[in-house]
Image (cartoon, rainbow, N blue to C red):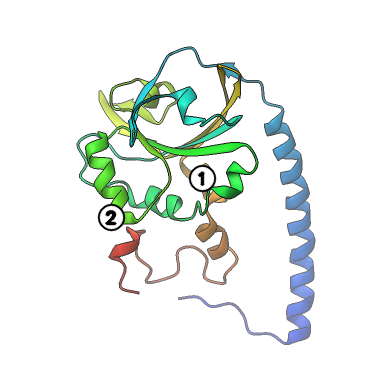
Amino acid sequence: MSLPEIVSREQWSAAREELRRKEEAVRRAREVLDSERRRLPMVEVDPEYVFEGGDGKATLLDLFEDRTQLVVHHFMFASEWETGCPCCAAFLDQVGHLAHLRARNTSFAAVSRAPFTRILPFKARMGWAVPWYSSAHSDFNHDFAATVESGGEPVERPGVSCFLRDHDRVFHTYSVYDDGLDVLGTTTALLDLTALGRHPAGSDRLRLHDEYDC
């Protein structure tokens, strides 16, 4: 394991100040990027997707729960899997209380291809209260690139998609997949601040939170 160089407090302060200036430049660049993201054009969602959730059948419009915006977490959970993806589970662990989103007129829901009969016990095991729906009987995952074909077989991808509602019309405004989710995760963001980073020597892959020994 390679450790950082040991220096005096004065040397550390100088090095930290140099890095702070670079961080500030990245922050300003990110603000510009965020502004460009908000100016992305949007596309109307025409198909009438039908999901299955805790209250039975639901449309994409229903997932908004009468709010203006909707954030969908494309949770990797294929129809034949017994449990969901550990990396997606780690992401969902960090979503936190939905009141902060709902206060800003934004709803949140996880969507997976697994049947709801498999989602429900896994959700209970993880202790999550977030809305979670099955898209098993629709093309939602394929249409929004959360499930793609590889070698003739469906392959799951983690992602987040954002939607906007104008009365009964629904629009797709943004999606991000795979490593693009790293900047959204609190754990990875915090680990990136540490000396050993997000993959320190001896660390294991992500697991479901009830499978750790700590």
Q: Is residue 56 above or below residue 138?
A: below
Along the viewing direction, whichever of 92 and 177 lies nearer the viewer: 92
- The x, y position of residue 110, in whole percent, is 42, 39
Give the Cα distance between marks 1 and 2: 24 Å
Along the viewing direction, whichever of 170 and 208 lies nearer the viewer: 170
Q: Going 71% across and 45% down the picture, which residue do you hit?
A: 30
Q: Residue furthest bottom?
A: 8
Q: Is residue 66 above or below residue 192?
A: above
User: In front of the other: label 1 or label 2?
Assistant: 2
Q: Quick one: SS at disc 2?
A: helix
Q: Going 76% across and 40% down the picture, which residue do you hit?
A: 32
Q: Quick one: SS at disc 1?
A: helix
Q: Earlier in the sequence, mark 1 or mark 2?
A: 2
The tag on residue 181 is 1
How many residues crowd mark 1 within 10 Å: few (<14), some (14–19), many (20+)? some
Which corner quadrant holds the C terminus? bottom left
The tag on residue 125 is 2
| Amino acid at dot 2 | Arg
Which corner quadrant holds the N terminus? bottom left
Number of marks in the rendered image: 2
Q: Is residue 174 left or right of residue 79?
A: right
- The x, y position of residue 164, in whole percent, is 60, 26
Q: Going 23% across and 41% down the picture, which residue do you hit?
A: 118
